[in-house]
Image (cartoon, rainbow, N blue to C red):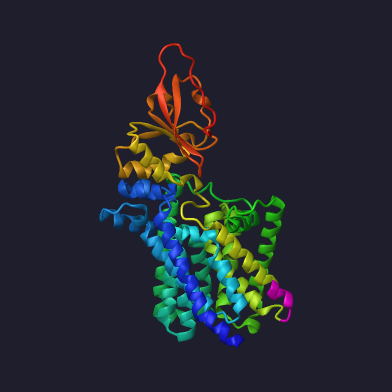
Amino acid sequence: MLASAKNIINRFLFPALIGTLMLYIIARGCMMDITDDEAWSFFNVKNFWYVETLCTGNTHWFNFVAIKTVVLLGWERTCQIRWFSMLSGLGFIYAAYLWLRTIKVFYLKCFGFCFLLLNPYLIEYLSLARGYTTALFFLALNLLFLMKAQNNKERRYLFLALFFAGLSAVANFNFLYYFAAFCLVYFYEYYFKKGIGFLKQKQFYIDLVFLGSTLSVILLAFRFIIICSNDIAAHGGRELVPSVFYSFVETLLYRNFALSQNVITISAYVLFVLVLFSIGFGLLKFKTHQSKLYVYASWILGLMFLFCLINKWCFNVLYPNERTTLMFYPLMAIVLVGLLHHVFNYFILKKIMVCLLSGFLLFTFIRSINFDTGYDHPYCKNTKQYFEDLKKLKAKNIAMSVEFYCVFYKYYQVIDPALIGESINTLGVYSRWIKEKPLEDFDYILLLPGSSLSWYKNSRIKLELVHFYPDTKVCILKITKIHGNTQAHRVILCIP
């Protein structure tokens, strides 16, 4: 009876959960306002200049082509420019489901589902027009074809695995770590360890040409970015665990819990030790677990961390953090599930702890569910509504907090040239976007909560609250010039 119930759950519950998750990704992609990174990509598509496009790490090539495709068709709504990312996100979810089906132990299957697919930060990026989603999808295809090659012994599946590993690195250059680690494992496993006989194999040279071509393209792109803007140099951390594993903990919690820094630090180091132990177990105990996927994931993940260390020590390249750590996440799920499957099998507390952790991950995900904002871009929430309201007010010239300016200048003003606006100094940050113009030159101000207008204390204006948005505490103020010797009006905080 119990076995029958589990069989029904496996056959119906998990497919239903996967389908629901796919619908959630589509809904977020259709309902969430554009983010500043997406706006930048859209602007480069609309105003293509190869230097501007290739000069920044913000340009993810497959994502760029996908946006260009819909723009040529005249489709410029946010959900339309996200079409390829959402499709890739659905593909990644389905690939993860195929892996979950191979896990026979029910509570471990639940843990794998919760750890890999109920990470709200990962789900956030599966619905944004960025290269991370596409790279994750290609990474998943790489692992699927690698396993298919083990089962079918067909050489074409191995080349497809190499091919998709290369595409993941082209889709997002951070995944070069993954591609390099996979290639080391791939060429050693299928060529080098069998002796020099591989030199007589035609397939070896085909694989070598693909490897060389892919690396050349990516390294040339890196060189151009470094010479042109070097905008990738400042992103990352200076220590491995604080950079990578603090990011995992903080983004997984998704600002749902106000934990002390000590708790985050302990959690990060516990996760780090668990991952290292999982990698070691996967590599040294193959006779125990008998899982090729576990072995390959352990090799690749371990080499990725090693390459991060070498890059930092030799070239002072910062460690990945936050969104750039997403490349580790699928492999971490595989090695952690692999470890839990084969250690402490007769330890009753293991099952209890894994179930409690799965429940916590589920609870965190449910608390994070929303359709209008994200972890990395909370200030972009409701921007469409703000600018629609300003258009209804027939605003001729809009002043705004600098945080709004990128999405305004690179998206909303592009699709609606009637809107005219500039950023003003409200916080003293992002100085390159700030226009030093007097407030008298504007009709309305769009302000984030806590903004300061102290830089304009001598302006001869009167400010009138027109719109206030309770959920974001953003407000729109109307500017009226004051004539004569009346004392200038001064506003510090825009909160009624």
Q: Taking 244 as reference, is 144 left or right?
A: left
- For the point 48% across and 71% down, the residue is 18
| Frontmost residue, 471 versus 432 | 471
Say whether residue 351 is magenta: yes
Is 331 positioned to the left or the right of 92 in the image?
right
Q: Position of residue 448 (x, y in %)?
A: 50, 38
| Residue 414: image location, x then y, percent | 32, 43
Residue at horizontal 47 percent and vertical 58 percent from the top: 125
Number of numbered discs visible in the structure rendering: 0
Q: Quadrant of residue 31?
A: bottom left
| Magenta span: chief secondary structure | helix
Farthest residue to the top: give it.
485
Looking at the image, which is closer to me, 198 or 304? 304
- The boundaries of the magenta stretch are 346-352
Q: Is residue 281 left or right of residue 369?
A: right
Q: Which residue lies furthest to the left in this view?
A: 73
